[in-house]
Amino acid sequence: MAGPLLLDTDVLIDYLRGQADAVAFLKKTKRTLRISAATVAELHVGVREGHEQEVLERFLGLLETVDITADIARRAGLWRRDFGKSHGTGLMDALIAASTESSGSTLVTLNDKHYPMLESVLVPYRK
């Protein structure tokens, strides 16, 4: 079996909204699933209080979270500096990329252009 996957926020949002391609992808994978702590923050930006937040919390509890360390933050800052203008890499993208690299995972995203610094990026479907 291949190594773990780190899921970008866009794929998780699609899954939580019941988007068929995202649901099918996550249901069929047998690989360990991780998320960056940056994604935890991004998902909470749009969640409604009550049932929606409870569902999100239960779902996040099923995934391994990669905490943002000083080394991850440093790498992310440098990548944001180096790729922000040329590739549209935002700070959150850079934190997710650094979390991916630090955890030895493969990033799963729909925005592969934001991650030129990673050797391996998996785009599971296109919208």
Image (cartoon, grey):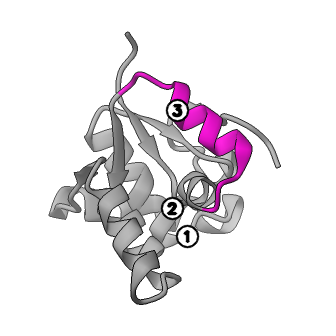
Q: Which residue is mark 1?
A: 90
Q: Nearer the viewer, residue 28 or 2?
A: 28
Q: Which residue is mark 2?
A: 93
Image coords of residue 61 (percent x, y)? 26, 55
| Contact check, label 1 and label 2, Cβ < 8 Å | yes
Q: Nearer the viewer, residue 47 or 88?
A: 47
- Residue type, label 3: Lys
- Nearer to us: label 2 or label 3: 3
Q: How many marks?
A: 3
| Contact check, label 1 and label 3, Cβ < 8 Å | no
Residue 106 found in image quarter? top left
**Cα distance, mark 2 to mark 3?**
25 Å
**Cα distance, mark 1 to mark 3?**
29 Å
**Cα distance, mark 1 to mark 2?**
5 Å
Q: Is residue 76 left or right of residue 103?
A: right
Q: Is residue 52 above or below residue 85?
A: below
Image coords of residue 53 (percent x, y)? 39, 78
Q: Residue at x 60, y 58 (%)?
A: 10
Say the numbered circle drawn on residue 27. 3
> Furthest residue to the right?
127
Secondary structure at badge 2 equals: helix
- Residue type, label 2: Asp
Residues shaded magenta? 17-31
- Residue type, label 1: Gly
Residue 41 found in image quarter? bottom left
Q: What secondary structure characterizes most of the magenta part? A: helix
Q: Residue at x 72, y 44 (%)?
A: 20
